[in-house]
Image (spheres, helix red, strand yellow):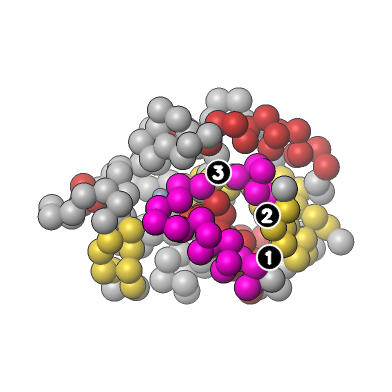
Amino acid sequence: MTHALLVIDVQNDFCPGGALAVAGGDQIVAPINAMMGRFDAVILTQDWHPAGHSSFASSHPDKAPFEMTEMPYGPQVLWPDHCVQGTDGAGFHPDLRTDGDLIIRKGFRSAIDSYSAFFENDRATPTGLKGYLDTRGISKLTLVGLATDFCVHYSAVDAAKLGFDVTVVQSACRAIDMEGSLAAAQQAMQAAGVTLAD
Ligand code: VGL
Ligand code: ZN
């Protein structure tokens, strides 16, 4: 079985000092680098928003970061401006090995957010990652990265629904954990058949 490591959004804006910092986000860089050699393929994702993206609270005059809004595709958390295309914040953590096979970018459509590496938040627009994995014969995925309760969670659940054998190594992930979102994500991942490991 061809086994890929999927490294989710280990970018400066999700690390301490970044615009949407995840506590301890930088602590997973060394363990992820150390894992890379054990896989048949290494794929990295990059959150990659145009300035003024609709998921930014700054694009909604009456809203503050971490409040909710209603998008045509459903409820959406509003975030501080982050991972704006071409900025340092959108860059990978400087110590992360980026010599993987593929970098897939997501969240580049202004009107729609994309937590998952497979489908945008309308749950219908594909990123193309499934086609890449299928054509390479990759059927088993291990996920690590940021943030456990958003992009790792949505990517893992979509991967399991698409029929991949999916493991999330939680010790190589860190969470935003807004109002119980980590526990909810762990439940949803388990319900989808994702293996949670440490
Ligand atoms: C993420 C919130 C907004 C993530 C990305 O990578 O988990 N979270 N954009
Ligand atoms: Zn984002």
What is the secondary structure assignment of the residue under circle 3?
strand
- The amino acid pointed to by label 3 is Arg
Which part of the image, by quadrant, shows the N terminus? bottom right
Answer yes or no: do the residues labelled 1 and 3 have beta carbons within 8 Å? no
Q: Position of residue 167 (x, y in %)?
A: 72, 58
Q: What type is the residue that disc 1 sits on?
A: Val
Q: Mark 2 touching mark 1, by CB under 8 A?
A: yes
Disc 1 or 3, which lies upstream in sequence?
3
First to last magenta residue range: 168-192
Work out whether 26 lies above or below 3. above
* Three-letter amino acid code at the position of disc 2: Val
Residue pointed to by mark 1: 194
Q: Residue at x 46, y 64 (%)?
A: 120
Residue lying at 51% horizontally and 56% vertically, measured from the top left: 182
Q: CA distance from mark 2 to mark 3?
A: 11 Å
Q: Is residue 175 magenta?
A: yes
Looking at the image, residue 186 sits to the left or right of residue 137; the answer is: left
- Label drawn at residue 174: 3
